[in-house]
Image: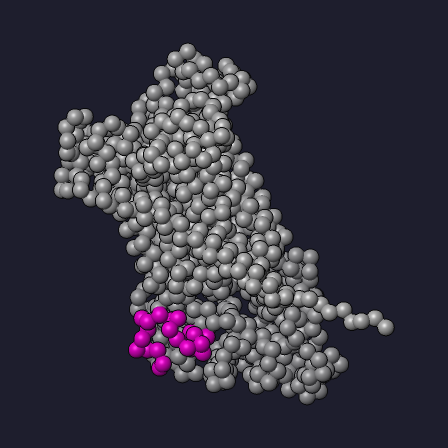
Amino acid sequence: MEKKPGSPVRLFSTYARSSTRRVRLMDGIAGKGTMAAGLLIVALLVLLLNEMFRLSLPAICHFGIGFFTSSDWDPQGERFGVLPFLYGTLVSSAIALVIAIPFGIGTALFLTELAPQRLRGAVAFVVDMLAAIPSVVYGLWGVFVLAPLMQSHVGPFLEKTLGFLPLFRGPFYGGVSMLTAGLILAVMVVPFIVAIAREVLLTVPVDLKAASYALGATQWETIWKVVLPYSRVGIGGGVVLALGRALGETMAVTMVIGNQPRINASILQPGYSMAAVLANEFNEASSKLYLSVLVEVGLTLFLVTFLINIAARVLLWRMRSVHPH
Amino acid sequence: MTDQSKISAQDLSIFYGANRAVKNVSMEIRENRVTALIGPSGCGKSTFLRALNRMNDIIPSVRAEGRVFLDGQDIYAPRVDVIDVRRRVGMVFQKSNPFPKSIFENVAYGLRINGVRSRKVIEQQVEKSLRGAALWDEVKDRLQTSALAMSGGQQQRLCIARALAIEPEVLLMDEPASALDPIATQKIEELIHDLKRDYTIVIVTHNMQQAARVSDFTGFFLMGELIEVDETGTIFTKPTRKQTEDYITGRFG
Amino acid sequence: MSTPIKLELGGAASGSLRRMQNRMFLCLTGAAALTLLVPLFGILGYLVTRGIGAINLDFFISLPKPVGETGGGVANAIVGSLMVIVMAGAAAIPCGVLASVYICEFAPGSRFSSIIRFVCDMLNSTPSIILGIFAYGMVVLRMGHFSALAGAFALFVMMTPVVVRATEEILRTVPNSIREASVGLGGTRWQTVWHVVLPAARSGIVTGVFLALARVGGETAPLLFTAFGNQFWNLDPRQPINTLPVQIYKFATSPYADWHRQAWAAALLLVIMIAVISSTVRALTARR
C-alpha cells in the first residue's frame, strides 16, 4: 500500500473529538423524543374516550338504556330516543355493502387475475380517484344528480316492479332516501374493498393456481374453487373494514338520506343516521342535555366502529397466521 | 511485527433466543495478521465474527456469554462504550452496502458522525482511505457521483475505504468477496494482503482456497464449535483433528 | 373377467359449457370494474360542466356574498383551508414521523410499539365526525368559542396516524444492511436514523405526507363544529375560520340557485387541488 507522502499517518485519531458523551446524550434524547411522540398518539385515544364519556355522562345518567330502545326523537320536548338513527345507519350501510361487495370483489379479481397489464394501471387509477373524492363532493353530486334521478326514474320503477314488498313503497320525498344514501355509500366504500381484496388475492400462491390449471380447470373454476376459498377470511376482513367506514361516513349521507327521525320499512323513504344527526344538530343543540345526548350518539357510533374494526383486524390477522406467506 | 494477541475470545457463547449458535469458543487473534474463519454454512463463524465488535447487539434476540478482550480489555464488560469498540474494530459485510449517497460522503460518513468537522481533514482522510482501498485512481474524478452507480467490486472496496476512514485497529470481513466475480475477488485479496501491514484482519470465508491464499492463521468452525485453529499452512497440510481433515479434503460440507 | 372402466372426463358438451361459464364470469368481473367508471365520470363530468361556469377571477379573490346577492367568491375559504391544513400538518408530520421512527428504529417489536400501531389503526378508522366532537370538547369548550385552532386540532388527530403508518411502511423498505454499515462505523441509533435511514426514505415519506394532506384537505365533518366558518375574512387562528369543504356544504344545502352554482365551482376547485397534489407527488416519486 502506498501512503501519500507528507500526509499524517493517523489523521482521524488526531482530529476526532471525544464526542462519545455528547453523541450518547443526543441518542438518549432522540430515543425519549420519539417515544414521547408515540406516547402522545396513545394519549390522544385515551383523551378522546375520556372526553366523550365526560360530555355524554349527563345523558347516560338521565336516560339509561331507554335511550337506545325509544324511537321518539323530540329535542324540544326533551324526548331523545335514538333508535331511528341506529336503524338508519345500519340499513344504509347494509344497502351499501350489498351493492359494493360484488363490484369490489369483481374489480379486485379483474385487477389481480385477468386484466392485461396496461389496463391494470387504468383501473387502479379509477379506484384511487374514487377514494380521493371528498365526501362533501359525493354529497353534492348526490343532492343534485342522483336524488333527482331516483325521484324521476329509479324510485317509480322499483315501486312498479317490486312495490308488493314493503321494502320498495313510496311516496318519495324528492329522491332523498335510505336507498340513495346506500348507493352513494356503496360508491365510496368500493375502493376499500378493492384495495384489501386485491392485497389478499395477491397472497394466493402461484403454485396453488398452477396446480388447478394443470388439472384442466378453467380460469373461473380456479378462481371459484381455489383462489376465493383461500382468500375468504382476508376478504371478509376487508368487507368488515368497509362496513366500519360506511357506518361512520357523514357528509354524503347527511346530504341525501332525508334526515327524518322515523323508522320506515321502505328503503325508498327518508331516514336518518347517527353521523348525520351529529352533523345537522350539534351546532343547534340549545341545552346541555341535548348536547350531551348528541355526544352519546357519537360515543355509540365510536364504540360500534371501534368493535367492528377490531373484528376486521382479527380476521385479517387470522388470515396471516393461517397462511403466513 | 510481533505475533502478540490483539483479540482474545474466552469461553464465548452466543445465543439466538434459546438456540446456542456459538459454543464456548476460545481463540486468539494475532496482531497484524490475517486470520481466516472457515466452516460449513451455519457453523457459527459469522456470528462469532460479529461478536468481536458487538454487532450482534442490534439484534434484540441475541445474547452473548463469555469474554472478548481487545488489547486486554473486555469489550463485554458492563461499562464499556460499545460505540468506541465499533470504532476500533471496523467491519466489512458480505453484501456491499454503500449508503445511497455520493462516493465522497460514504467515506466521510464515519468521520462526520465521530465529530470531525474540518473540511480539509475530511478531504485528506477520504483520499487516504480511498488510496488505502486501492480505489482512488478509479474514482478520483467522480467523487460526487452516487456510490450506487459503481460496480459490485468497486462498491465493496468503497465499503472497505469507508471502514478504513476512521482508522480502526482491527478489520472484520464477513465473506467480503462472495458476491464478486473472480477479477474483483482478486483485487480484494490483494488489498487484504496490503492492509495487513497496518491492521489486524479477521475474515470469514466459505472458500477454502481463499483462506489458504490470504490468511496467516485459520480457524475451523463446526456446529458452533471451534474445532481447530493453527497456522494456515498447518491447517491445510496436516490438521490434527479428523473433522478438519474431512472438511478441507471435501469429504463433507 | 371384468371390463376395464373408462373414465368419462369432460365430454364435448361439458367442455363447451365450462368454457362458456368461464367466459361469462370473466366478463362479469370486467364489467364490475368498468361500472366503476360510471360514478367517477358522472361526478367529474358534472363537476366540470356545472362548476366551470362559476369560476372566474372574482371567485378566487372575493368573499361570499350575503343571501340574495349573486356573485362573490370563496377567497376566505381557500385561505382558511390552507391555514388549517398547514397548522394540522405542522403538528402531525413531526409527531407522526417521530412516532414511526420509534416503532421501526428505536423499539422494533416491542410491546409499546405494537400498542402505538394499534392505536393508529383505531384512530385511522374512527369516523371523522367523532374527531370533530373530540376537538369540540378539547378546544372549543375550553376556549369558549369556535376557532381555526380547534379545526386544526381535529385534522391533526386525523392526520397523525396516517403519517405514522405511511412512514412506517417506507422505513421498512430501507435495507437493514445500510443500518448495519452505520452502526458498524460507531454510529448511534439516532445518527443512523438521521444521516442514513431518513435520507434514504425521504422521497417516500414526502409522498406519504402529501397524500395525507390531500386526504384531510377534503374533510368537512371534523370542521363543522370546530373551525365553524362564516363569510368574513379571518387570519387569526383563535377565531372561527371558513374552509372550502364547509363552504361547499353550506352552498349545497342552501335553497339558492346561485349558491348551488358556486358549490359546484368550489367542489371542482377542491377536487382539482387534491388531484394535482396526489398526481404530482405520485409522478415525482415514480420517476425516482
Give coordinates of residue A119: x percent, y percent.
39, 61
Q: Say if the magenta span includes residue A186.
A: no
Q: Nearer the viewer, residue C187 or A312?
A: A312
Q: Nearer the viewer, residue C227 or A225?
A: A225
Q: Residue furthest bottom?
A: B237
Which residue: 45% across, 14% down? A79
Q: Residue C93 occupies which quadrant of the picture?
A: top left
Q: Say if the magenta span includes residue B155.
A: yes
- Number of labels in the image equals 0
Which residue: 38% across, 28% down? A172
Q: Residue A289 occupies which quadrant of the picture?
A: top left
On screen, C222 above or below B81?
above
On screen, C2 above or below C247?
below
Does any portion of residue B190 appear in the rendered image? Answer: no
Q: Is residue B250 left or right of residue C84?
A: right
Give coordinates of residue B177: x percent, y percent.
52, 78
The quadrant of the rendering that contains the N terminus of chain A is bottom left
Q: Which residues are magenta?
A: B137-158
Which residue: 57% across, 61% down? C18
Q: Is residue A323 left or right of residue A196?
A: right
Q: Nearer the viewer, residue B52 or C134?
A: C134
